[in-house]
Amino acid sequence: MRPRRPKLRDEVVTLAHGAGGKSTRALVEGLFLEELGNPLLEPLGDSALLELNGVRIAFTTDSYVVAPVFFPGGDIGELAVNGTVNDLAVAGAQPLALSAGFVIEEGFSVADLQRIAASMAKAAAAAGVVIAAGDTKVVERGNADGLYVNTAGVGLVRAGVALGSERVRPGDRVLVSGTLGDHGIAVMVARGGLELEVSLDSDTAPVHELAAALLELGHAVRWMRDPTRGGLATALNELARQANVAVVLDESSLPLRREVVGACEILGIDPLYVANEGKLVAVVAAEVTAAALAALRAHPLGAEAAVVGEVRAEPKGFVLLDTAFGGGRIVDMLVGDPLPRIC
Amino acid sequence: MRFVDEFRSGELARKLAREIDSLVEPGRIVKIMEVCGGHTHTIYKHGVEDLVPAEVDFVHGPGCPVCVIPMGRVDDAISLAERADVIFTTFGDMLRVPGGRGSLLEAKARGADVRMVYSPLDALEIARRNPDREVVFFAIGFETTAPATAVTLLRARAEGIGNFSAFCNHVTIGPPLRAILESPGLRLDAFIAPGHVSTVIGTRAYDFIVREFARPVVVTAFEPVDILQAVVMILRQLRDGRCEVENQYTRVVRRDGNPRALAAIEETMELRNTFEWRGLGWIEQSALRLRPEFADWDAESRFELPGAQIEDPKVCQCGEVLIGAIKPWECRVFGTACTPERPIGTCMVSSEGACAAYYNYGRLARGRDPVSV
């Protein structure tokens, strides 16, 4: 069912391969899947699902290279914990334990490192996980831009949970748990150089309770993702392609902060492609739409949840947007815009 | 964002669309060229074509500054970027433009120090902070961006910053419009003239289109409601048998433009005898270079450049797209060999390029049911 894999035709890796769009897909599917492909990796979900003695385990990893390491609303440590917790949560798992690997540049401040470790401990406690294994490496000055962090995590998939793009049907509805693009814009503004006076915090937060609340609705919940790098547009394009359906968004329903809309106008970017670090996007059966929205809104992190679109049979593989202006357009995969490192 | 919202109002759009419906003659196609890539982007991003009848045909013009830079100039830029002593600064959308030997983004991946900036003043700041390196700014764009380059050059001279230079590729909007109007087989009825560039050059810059070529012109802003209003103004001119330069962007554009910006350009730059435009070929007096007094800040005088002319790929039909002779999807490589991630022609690179805008936003049949949420 999976469409033909893209070929990686580049001779060197460019920043476009890291932007989460088409070039990233070519790198992941055209190189890594070619060499490493196996049934656990193939679905390219947020987590792999392993079955061990009848128990289903979700397993995932993610690396964090955000610059600056401290940004409004969070830091690289909190981000690294929440990001991996969220990858497990949207796979329908209760997050259990994380590992943490640190690549530290010679000269990095110990006080800053301590602050980051403390923030990881706090985030882990909030998400109910332990950091059970770790590793440190120090590299010469000029490498690693201060600090890179990798986290991996395992979680226990709840009994009866069945999520996947293959379960998505035309007529299903698309929900997001809150405002879009806050993290990416907060970090871009924090990087400076733009002299934008915007007061905006990253949305970094664990979404495991939001995911658990939705899963109470049972099999009517079809699919969940954590729309990080590449934003909502990228997550939904992957869904449209994998499920062989169309997703149609309603621009006027998208929850967006004024600050994000304003910064995006100035920077010439579309908030649909901007990273979130504390949001989930879910596809649910139409008949539970109201219940799903209520379940999200009942949680403080989901207060601004919204129904933003629906699944259609045609045109297969596309994400479309009905504009507030009264027209329509395609929302394609991001094409390698050289955005700064934000996660 | 109230300021923007007013110009994206669906209600206002429907009202203008009804007026357009009442102004068109059924079956008589009116071809309107929107000169500027910013307009092309707006038309596709907001689905403006969905609101106008089939009789209104938008033809996408040559006003995307990234799209018109010839491959040889991109190669010159790469050769500058590859010098060990150079920090090469550029607007983000030039990074992926293919030259004869790859793009600046690929040169960066191979080790060239290429940095994205939002303004030439940012490049000057990099020069201040790196006195032992040569900082070169890739100056591109119409009269819209030329004043920023000019101001930066004046400041570099005033502050005596000797390690900054501009690789000047600024172009002017009048000559390519004349070239299009003089091209054989032209079938354009009217022009939506660019808003931003007109804030600098004023509406009088388009008088020749009315006087010599008898085509109505409406200088237009960039929100979707602005474009619909411009279509109404054009259709009224055609209905009344008028042919004038009208100004829809009265909130910013003046008849004489911005004299201070023009003076800054005049002080630092002069017309080149001729310049190569991607897809359009050589056009006389269509581009700017630095005046000899600014040779110390002119990358073309300070560094040796290959200066090679490179022919556009044979399969590429950007030239025909840029003069509106064909629609993006009528190009033989559109969406197959030429896509935004692997562009053959420049129209597919910048989000303001007609092909990229159409590929990203528009390449599906119309007539869907609206979504209900």
Image: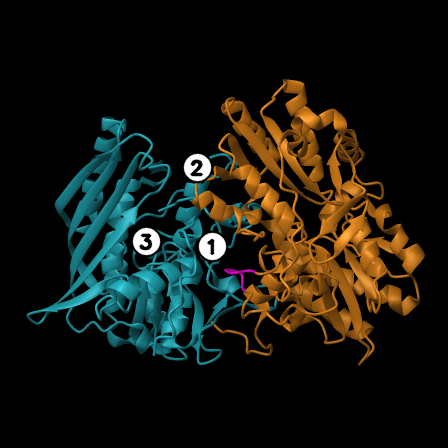
Q: Which residue is mark 2?
A: A191
Residue A74 place in picture, x, y as percent:
32, 40
Secondary structure under badge 3? helix
Residue A134 place in picture, x, y as percent: 14, 43
Q: Which residues, given as a range, are shown in magenta? A: B339-343
- Magenta span has A4? no
Q: Is residue A31 above or below residue A160?
A: above
* Callout in the foreground (1, 2): 1
Residues marked 1 and 2, same chain: yes
Residue A135 vertical position relative to residue A87 in the rendered view, above or below: above
Q: Secondary structure at mark 1?
A: loop
Tell me if I can see residue B45 in this picture: no
**Does label 1 or label 2 sit earlier along the sequence?**
2
* Percent coordinates x, y for residue A320 in the rendering: 50, 69
Residue receiving disc 3? A301
Chain whose colour in the figure is cyan: A
Q: Nearer the viewer, residue B326 or A262?
A: B326
Check disc 2: other Cα within 10 Å, few if <14, some if 14-19, many if 20+: some
